[in-house]
Image: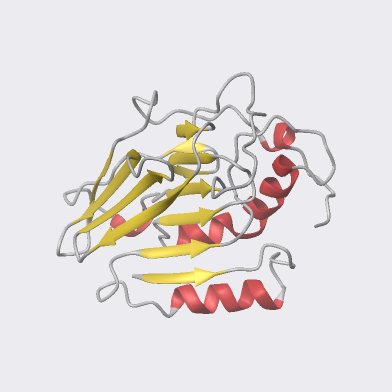
Amino acid sequence: MHVAVLSTEHVLQQGSAQHAWLEGDLAAVRREDTPWLLVAGHRPLYVDADDAGEPGGKQAGAALLRGAIEDLLERHGVDVALSGHHHSYQRSCPVFQGVCQEPKGAAEADAKRRRHGTVHVCFGNGGAELYHNQMPQRPRWAAFEEVTKHGHVRIHADAERFQLQAIEAKTGEVFDEVVLTRKKDGAEADVHPPGHGVQEPVNAGFSKSEWGRWAATF
């Protein structure tokens, strides 16, 4: 497993030193030896927060980050993106450009041209006051959300299986789990569960204009 840790408080746009570092770091990973590729940073690329239109808000920051590095994550097949910032627990489907991607079976042809999608996990529920400012209608890419429990995540991984569990601090109970599996030949197999309330890949319903080209600085 390889984890690239970013500073989301500094410039990540193409042409920046951090973008160049991330591109070089991801490109250098030998996926035949490293089945799981993760990125981590404080701010999320995807977040269910009802603050669209607020300069410097969580939606504005997420849009900037997607514009800066989402294509890069897709191109290098990043499996999971870890973040915090929003004081809740949120997990996406394997998503790219707001659209849930289908699991890719080993028999599919032209594997390099298939879209991959990244599972985004925001676990900002470590101990501070929890946020309850979710959007009135949950985004279609949002596979699971929990806004009432503090906790942490636990990861178990081997060559063929990546398991992430969300653990409640008070009880120690698992309240969410996602498992990614991969064949020995490197072909992706499946993601379990496919998504809470997401039965098949669907468009998230947010166009670039709706997300907005935010001028936030953070």
Q: Position of residue 216 (x, y in %)?
A: 83, 50
Q: Which quadrant is home to the N terminus?
A: bottom left
Q: Position of residue 6 (x, y in %)?
A: 60, 68
- The residue drawn where x is 48% and y is 48% is 120
Colour scheme in use: secondary structure
Identify which residue is drawn at 32% across, 40% down. Answer: 173
At x 56% / y 73%, what residue is drawn? 22
Find the residue positioned furthest to the front: 170
Residue 118 relative to residue 112: left or right: right
- Residue at 59 percent across and 78 percent down: it is 21
Position of the C terminus, as image quadrant, is bottom right
Position of residue 145 in the picture relative to residue 54 (left or right):
left
Q: Residue furthest top?
A: 136
Image spot of residue 152 (x, y percent): 44, 51
Looking at the image, how many numbered discs can be counted on the residues? 0
Q: Nearer the viewer, residue 95 or 177?
A: 177
- In this rendered view, identify the residue nearer to me: 204 or 111: 204
**Residue 71: x, y in percent?**
55, 57
Above/below status of 37 relative to 56: below
